[in-house]
Image: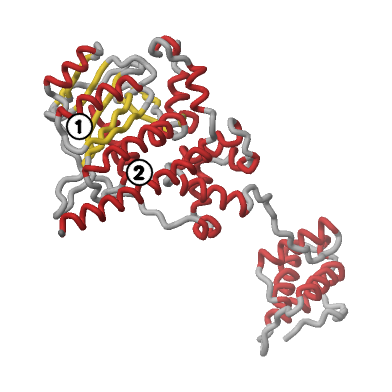
Amino acid sequence: MNINTTDTRNLSVAEIEEFLKAPKPFEFSATNRKEAYKWIETALVRFEYRKLKRNHKGIVREYLKVMTGYSNPQIARLIARQRKEGHIVRKSYHRTKFKTLYERADIILLAKTDELFDFPSGPSLRQTCKRQYEIFHKEDFKQLSHISTGHVYNLRAHPAYRNTTRYFRPTPTTAVQIGERHKPAPDGRPGYIRVDTVHQGDDLELGKSVYHINFVDEETQWEMTACVPVISEKYLAPIFEVVLKLYPFIIIEFHSDNGSEYINKAVASILNRLKIRQTKSRPGKSNDNALVETKNNAVIRKEMGYLFIQKGAYKIINEYYHDWLNIFLNFHRQCAYPVITINSQGKRKRTYPPNNYKVPYEKLKSLPNAEHYLKPGVTFAQLDKIAYNQSDIDFKTEMNKARSTLFVKIKERYLRDSIRHIN
């Protein structure tokens, strides 16, 4: 039954009490909030609610509750509002609207950048966007230059992001069992190189594939890559000598696992001639060479995949590495650098603050007295021309085109070799 908002009968509190005790053949409820508020306000004024005794107030409150169908907390709020403001008016609802920081265009740009750099970690992508605006002055990255790492992951779930980029599934890790002999200890100095081999993958008919050699500096993560058709002194020794000379800083130590491709007289002779100390990993300490193992998966496998590549392609792969990949890795790709703390129990803890993401060249420049580590004849002015000649985005775009051309050539060579093998 709807309440009568025009009811002005002078009911006493005693009459209301008797009314509440009587059986109800029907239920009361308010169908119109505006009219119900008006009726409650009129009733409170008519009964002079403020002047009533405490027990009489309870009777009036119960009466209002029965007639409107409202709950005790609702009636209490409305009485308090009438007492404070003198009337009860329905308040209009205004939804709080937050300012949109990242428009659809920003999310699409983030998705394209993420895909271009092969889906790096959130802090790395954040730092890349920041560099585009602050160093290379790309205005379209102005808003993204302030993005937080957490919001990078939020936007990756946005429909605009998912509709822009292809589906990505992280490359599964592979277990590598390596004997270790020496703990890497650069002590904040560059020049402590870690090296490892990555086998591309075999073909049942065409045999063995190429091998990638990965060199990583322990302190700066300066990385150089090379390719050889077979693991032998004939190909490895010249590659070692060339790559070690390409590093801009002085090499102090050459560290590898206990494989025969590294522990042999030819490599030892080269290292002795270059005055580089050779070390091996310790048994049972797999973390000794962990950095280069991580780079094998994050760089080599991401760049070259797992499919078979015939041995004859190693020359064009080396050209691509020299002209594109090695430059990208050291001047345009973000790397995470840990901050190591030791607690009271002597345990070491590694953290990766967002401001510790840098490209290896910037890490090298940030070292105390960095110029003292450079080789004679090498200056930061020369390296700056390489580092800032192109933005990260522009260089990676051209590099991806070069990589596509490389794989077209590899495929053509594979088809020729397959036909020759069949014939």
Q: Quadrant of residue 10?
A: bottom right
Q: Which element is circle 1 on?
A: helix
Q: Position of residue 136 (x, y in %)?
A: 59, 33
Q: Position of residue 25 (x, y in %)?
A: 67, 90
Q: Nearer the viewer, residue 317 or 65?
A: 317
101 vs 351, left or right, is: right
Amino acid type shown at disc 2: Glu
Above or below, 4 relative to 397: below
215 vs 372, left or right, is: left
Mark 2 or 1, which is nearer the eye?
2
Q: Earlier in the sequence, mark 2 or mark 1?
A: 1
Mark 2: few, some, or many residues within 10 Å (few <14, many ≥20)? some
Location of the N terminus (image quadrant): bottom right
- The residue where tag 2 is placed is 303
Above or below, 47 relative to 204: below
Residue 18 in view, yes or no: no
| Count of picture labels | 2
- The residue where tag 1 is placed is 286
